[in-house]
Image (tube, rainbow, N blue to C red):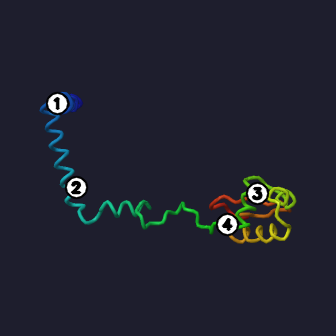
Amino acid sequence: MHLDVLDLRSFYYRTNLGRVAQKAVRDQVLMELARRLRGFLRASDVLSRLGMSPGARRTSQELRPAPQGQAAIVLDALGWQASTLEQLLARCELSLEVVSVALADLERSGWVTERGGWFERRARGEDPR
């Protein structure tokens, strides 16, 4: 049996007639597969399942509302390092009231978490614990 496999491999991959036969079989299999799957899988169906069609929403998109106005300024001043309220006040040069309200809005919308007086930016999908 081993020698038969070697003979077939030699025929299909090393001779012109074998390559033509291989292409003919491949083409027929692909045509039959396309005929059987017609109506089941269309390119638009596959793309929408992958989230790549124009109307599809991808699960990896940011679902939190984007910070606006002074909340965006405070979030930018926070960056990706834990900071105290005093450090944020120094960085963004806004009043205590404005920064406090902005931090409360950012916490409520899931952009920032507060732990022991330190404010930290939350990554997308991060557990709020």
Residue under label 1: 11
What distance separates the C-alpha of mark 3 from that of mark 4? 13 Å
What distance separates the C-alpha of mark 2 from that of mark 4? 50 Å
What distance separates the C-alpha of mark 1 from that of mark 3? 68 Å
Q: Nearer the viewer, mark 3 or mark 2?
A: 3
Dot 2 alpha-carbon crowd within 10 angstroms: few under 14, some 14 to 19, many 20 or more: few
Q: Amino acid at mark 2?
A: Leu
Mark 1 or mark 4: name the one nearer the start of the chain. 1
Mark 1 or mark 2: name the one nearer the start of the chain. 1
Residue under label 4: 67
Dot 4 alpha-carbon crowd within 10 angstroms: few under 14, some 14 to 19, many 20 or more: some
Dot 3 alpha-carbon crowd within 10 angstroms: few under 14, some 14 to 19, many 20 or more: many
Element at badge 2? helix
Residue under label 2: 33
Mark 2 or mark 4: name the one nearer the start of the chain. 2
Element at badge 1? helix
Element at badge 3? helix
Residue found at x 22% / y 29%: 6
What distance separates the C-alpha of mark 1 from that of mark 4? 66 Å
Location of the C terminus by quadrant is: bottom right
Residue under label 3: 78
Determine contact: label 3, label 2, CB under 8 Å. no
What distance separates the C-alpha of mark 3 from that of mark 2? 56 Å
Mark 3 or mark 4: name the one nearer the start of the chain. 4
Mark 3 or mark 2: name the one nearer the start of the chain. 2
Measuring from the top left, give residue 91's x and y in whole percent: 81, 56
Seen in the image, is 7 located left or right of residue 47? left
